[in-house]
Amino acid sequence: MAGSSRRKSLAGRIFWVLFLFSLAVAVAATVAATALSFSVYERDAEQILLAQASSYAELIEDKRSEDAMAASLAELPFVETRCTLIAADGTVVFDNYADPASMDNHAQREEVSAAKESGKVAVMRRSETMGSDTLYAAALVRDGIVVRLAETRTSLASFLGGLSWQLAATLVIIFLMSLLVAHGLTVLITRPLRELDLSRPLDNDAYQELQPLLQRVDAQRSELEEQNHELEQAVALRREFTGNVSHEMKSPLQVIGGYAELMESGMVAPEDVPRFAGLIRSESQAMRELIDDVLSLSRLDERAEGSRVPIDLEGLCRRSAQRLEAAASERGVSVRLLLRRDIEVLGDPAMIEQMVYNLVSNAIKYNREGGLVLLQLESDAGSALISVEDEGPGIPEELRERVFERFFRIDASRSRDTGGTGLGLAIVKHVAESQG
């Protein structure tokens, strides 16, 4: 459970990355839009105030005196806007917020001096009189006389405070939209992964980046299928082999049991006892040979490939032929050796000698009376070539592929007469494959 709880979810990671990214982008866009809106708001307010200042300057331009100008301005309805009339020497002539006599000289004020030079100007600075950031718009009336309008400006914090409900609603909507977008994109991105058919990895219409992984999965799947097929074949062969062994051992056991029962019941004449004993010995020998071959095959099946040592094939072939001299003499068969002396290979000496022994033994058993067995050892393209020929009836072409099967006999009755177990060539095939 601990291991599974630590597993990372690809869909979860994609979701959170997309969610946080979309949320960050949306919030950044909102902040940028808000800042832009505030900037536009400030610029528009500046242009409006500057236009008002210009219109007031035009309104009082034709007045003869500064007092007449002040009187005209005093009649105007100002709403949250401060209006100041400044004489050419900087003296405040009129102010709708304060007593002009109590105010400092404004000749050096930034907006006043700039208006005298350029005609009109807008300046944002902190007003000492009003104690806040103030937007000033000043316009030249004539002869150095300046009319100035001032408005207390809203700070960015105050601007955002006025939009608090709208911003809160926007952030909630952004949060929900980010969730929906992240979920939708996660489903869209992971759908090809969830729909992968691992039984046919390369047939999936998946992302190109997944192709190496799918190729590896396909290779492993093919390897597993091949291993399963080989395992099924091995189980089937083992089952068939067990059945064949049971069948092959049943016949000699029945013969031995029958002869022993006859001898035990006294139904065999004394002069026939040696013959019956010889038959029992013959069947016992056949059983022993069968058991030896079965054990040999079993050892070959279970034996891991051991260390290989240099083998003198000429000496090995000669020893195998010498072991079969008695069997060849009994059937009147001659064994001729054509062995090249300088051939050496790496392998398991016992296994290769058993292979050569079985080939020569098979050639002797199935040869004609007085026939010839030719055992040759030669070199072919850097490989050792061992061949065994006899003068027997041969193998029909349609059965040549089956002669290496376990317990396969071309002529079952003749095989029993010659004492064959049906496993000799199967052992030969197994050794050749493992040592090749």
Image: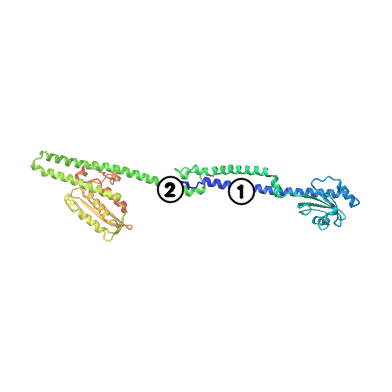
Q: Amino acid at mark 2?
A: Ala
- Among the 4 quarters of the image, the one containing residue 336: bottom left
Q: Position of residue 319 (x, y in %)?
A: 22, 56
Q: Could you say where residue 317 lies in the image, as x and y percent from the top left?
A: 24, 56
State the residue lying farthest toward the bottom.
Answer: 342
In the picture, the disc for residue 134 is: none
The one nearer the camera, 210 or 323, is: 210
- Distance from Cα at disc 2 to Cα at disc 1: 43 Å
Secondary element under disc 2, as helix, strand or loop, is helix
- List the residue tagged with mark 1: 24
Local secondary structure at mark 1: helix
- 214 to the left or right of 383: right
Q: Looking at the image, which residue is at 76% across and 48% down?
A: 45
Q: Residues within 10 Å of mark 2 (few under 14, many from 20)?
A: few
Q: Split into 4 quadrants, where in the image is the N terminus?
A: top left
Judging depth in this view, the residue of 221 and 191 nearest the camera is: 191
Residue kind at label 1, given as amino acid type:
Ala
- For disc 2, the marked residue is 219
Residue 164 is situated, as x and y percent measured from the top left of the image, at 68, 44
Q: Residue at x 14, y 45 (%)?
A: 278
Residue 314: give x, y in percent of width and height. 25, 58
Quadrant housing the C terminus: bottom left
Q: Is residue 62 shown to the viewer in this render?
A: no
